[in-house]
Amino acid sequence: MTLEAVLAAANDLDPETKKGQVCEANFYSGELALHRSAKDDAARLFRLATGMQPNILNAVSGARTTSPR
């Protein structure tokens, strides 16, 4: 999927739901960009994600450390 398609899928009538879903879309798109060595794109997407929900990185880091492998 393109970033545009992911953001379109994140759309929701409820503003809070939409905010959370767009934040996650930006974060995980940033992860993909980083994996593809597109560091500038990754940094931009991470800034967008943290601007929407400043604690997103803490939440994701916490989930990764507590989830079973």
Image (cartoon, helix red, strand yellow):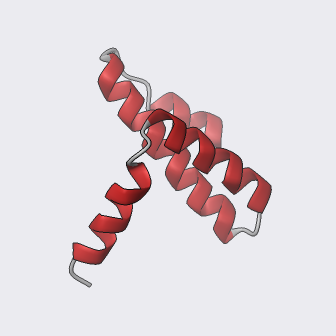
Say which residue appears at 37% left-offset and 58% top-offset.
Answer: 58
Side (left or right) of 49 relative to 10: right
Say which residue appears at 51% left-offset and 54% top-offset.
Answer: 28
Above or below — where is 64 with respect to 16?
below
* Front residue (pair 51, 3): 51
Side (left or right) of 38 relative to 51: right
Side (left or right) of 65 relative to 39: left
Q: Which residue appears farthest toward the bottom when viewing the image?
A: 69
Residue 65 lies in quadrant: bottom left
* Front residue (pair 63, 55): 55
Above or below — where is 52 with respect to 16?
below
Above or below — where is 47 with respect to 34?
above
Side (left or right) of 17 relative to 22: left
* Front residue (pair 64, 25): 64
x and y percentages locating residue 63 in the rendered image: 28, 65
Say which residue appears at 40% left-offset and 28% top-offset.
Answer: 19
x and y percentages locating residue 64 in the rendered image: 32, 71
* Front residue (pair 34, 50): 50
Above or below — where is 25 with respect to 69?
above
Say which residue appears at 67% left-offset and 65% top-offset.
Answer: 34
Q: Is residue 42 visible?
A: yes
x and y percentages locating residue 8 in the rendered image: 52, 28
Q: Please state, as top left, top right, bottom left or bottom right, where the C terminus lies in the image.
A: bottom left
x and y percentages locating residue 11 in the rendered image: 43, 25
